[in-house]
Image (cartoon, rainbow, N blue to C red):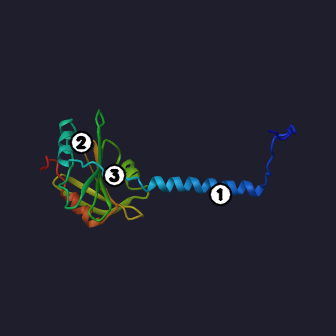
Amino acid sequence: MSQAPETGRPGRYERSFGGLVGSMIVLVLVVLGIVVFRGSFRDTPEFEPPEIDYPALVASVQHAGMRPVYAPELPDGWTVKDASYRAGERPALDVVFATDDGHTAGIHQEDASERDLLESYVGEQAAESGETLTTPVGTWTGWDDTDDDHAWTTEVDDQTVLVFSSGDADELRAFVESLTTEPIAS
């Protein structure tokens, strides 16, 4: 058997810009094919936030020592979206609701100035609406912002209570009127 004579040079192939582009296109198509193939066999779970037991939340905050706690009976279709409580010498309670019409409403109660809370939760352009509201739990001052946010504030026992919403102003007024400092029904 005879072998081909060795020339001492390794084999070469032609390198070109067109070959590089062609290789890159093939590589991208292979990667996309893998992604599509894997994605077709994958189920993406839907995220459902945990349901917050609103009456239990209010009771636990009252039990922790924050008094009074301003809490409404929730209107039909409203749910608690998020809640936080900071204990200590200067406790703070923040509850955010999802309204039945897709807006957000909230109650924030803290030993902070009215202006600071308005700037944080409503907007820097919040101005008094000229309305006041007297309820069994306080006298409230109405506020409006330039982007149709509405709020009501009252001060009691060195705390400011802010109720705010991006939704209907009349619905927020009814929400404020429903506020109580008594334990709410579960």
Q: State the residue position of label 3.
A: 47
Q: What amino acid does circle 2 point to? A: Asp
Q: Position of residue 19 (x, y in %)?
A: 74, 55
Badge nearest the viewer, 1 or 3: 1
Q: Nearer the viewer, residue 32 or 112?
A: 32
Res. 19 in view: yes
Q: Tell me which label, 1 or 3, sits earlier in the chain.
A: 1
Q: Tell me which label, 2 or 1, sits earlier in the chain.
A: 1
Q: State the residue position of label 2.
A: 157
Residue drawn at 62 percent across, 53 percent down: 27
Q: What amino acid does circle 3 point to? A: Phe
Q: What amino acid does circle 1 point to? A: Ile
Residue drawn at 65 percent across, 57 percent down: 25
Q: Nearer the viewer, residue 14 or 35?
A: 14
Q: Position of residue 26 (x, y in %)?
A: 64, 56
> As displayed, is residue 107 above or below residue 85?
below
